[in-house]
Image (spheres, rainbow, N blue to C red):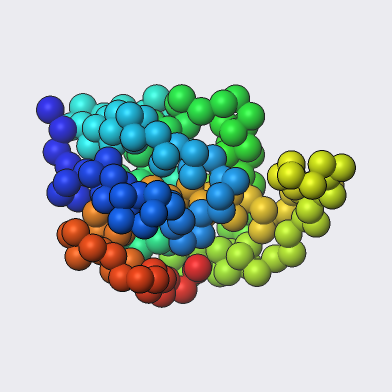
């Protein structure tokens, strides 16, 4: 049996959002090409992942426990309030059914932050002090991203040219985390959802790391 702490669950929230915003789904810090956007358009997948994330018997499906703990700590710093809505657990459930390419990109990004923590303080990310976590996230969020590769096909999405930077890894994780949080009831209420209507425009979030 599940215990959905954010009330009505993500599927109902997303149904309201897509029905009340002309079928659009645009959440803060989640690019249209980000894997999370595709996941959130699949209501069956969202429902299954949400139920698994809130199950009292929840266990990681794709990540190991250390990685889940790392995602949980990162998520809470990037989007405060992520822990109560089970963002880390929700992300793990979606990753378990994602493509191998997206799984590898996620693990690469997570590994980059672990390496950053070890380089800074010789400890894993989850063991860093709050001050060190904030300092490193600030550094990552303001670093230079890899320049986009120009595609011969103007319709095809661009990808990064050359090696990814810590900024690229930050943006990837932020997209996963933001999608997980803002698709929950508390996240939608933060954006102006009153339970049945939205403001004409998202009020946006005021979290410092965004």
Question: Quadrant where the N terminus lies?
Answer: top left
Q: Position of residue 107 (x, y in %)?
A: 58, 36
* Residue 194 location (% of width, % of height): 20, 65
Residue that extends furthest to the front in the rendered view of this protein:
22
Q: Nearer the viewer, residue 19 or 63?
A: 19
Task: Tell me if residue 131 comes above or below residue 176 in the rendering.
Answer: below
Question: 41 left or right of 47?
Answer: right
Residue 150 visible in this rendered orientation of the protein: yes
Q: Nearer the viewer, residue 24 or 84?
A: 24
Nearer to the camera, 123 or 44: 44
Which residue occupies 17% across, 42% down? 4
| 145 relative to 201 in the view: left or right | right
Q: How many marks?
A: 0
Identify whether 62 is placed above or below 194: above
As displayed, is residue 146 above or below residue 143?
A: above
For the residue pair 73 and 163, the one nearer the viewer reads as 163
From the top left corner, tell me how far across and down residue 89 is, in percent.
Answer: 34, 38
Q: Residue at x 31, y 50 (%)?
A: 19
**Left or right position of 157 against 84:** right
- Where residue 70 sits, quadrant-wise, is top left
Q: Position of residue 163 (x, y in %)?
A: 80, 46
- At horizontal 26% and vertical 50% (from top left) the residue drawn is 16
């Amino acid at each position: 049996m599940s215990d959905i702490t954010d009330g009505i669950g993500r599927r109902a929230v997303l149904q309201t959002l897509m029905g009340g915003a002309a079928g659009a789904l645009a959440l803060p810090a989640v690019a249209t090409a980000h894997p999370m956007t595709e996941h959130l358009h699949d209501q069956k997948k969202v429902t299954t992942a949400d139920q698994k994330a809130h199950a009292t018997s929840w266990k990681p499906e794709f990540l190991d426990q250390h990685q889940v703990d790392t995602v949980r700590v990162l998520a809470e710093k990037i989007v405060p309030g992520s822990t109560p809505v089970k963002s880390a657990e929700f992300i793990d459930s979606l990753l378990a059914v994602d493509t191998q390419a997206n799984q590898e990109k996620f693990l690469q990004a997570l590994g980059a932050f672990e390496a950053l923590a070890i380089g800074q303080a010789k400890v894993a990310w989850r063991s860093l002090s709050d001050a060190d976590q904030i300092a490193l996230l600030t550094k990552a969020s303001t670093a230079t991203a890899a320049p986009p590769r120009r595609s011969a096909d103007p319709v095809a999405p661009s990808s990064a040219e050359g090696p990814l930077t810590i900024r690229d890894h930050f943006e990837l994780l932020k997209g996963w985390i933001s999608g997980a949080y803002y698709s929950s009831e508390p996240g939608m209420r933060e954006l102006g959802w009153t339970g049945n209507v939205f403001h004409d425009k998202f009020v946006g979030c005021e979290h410092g790391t965004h």
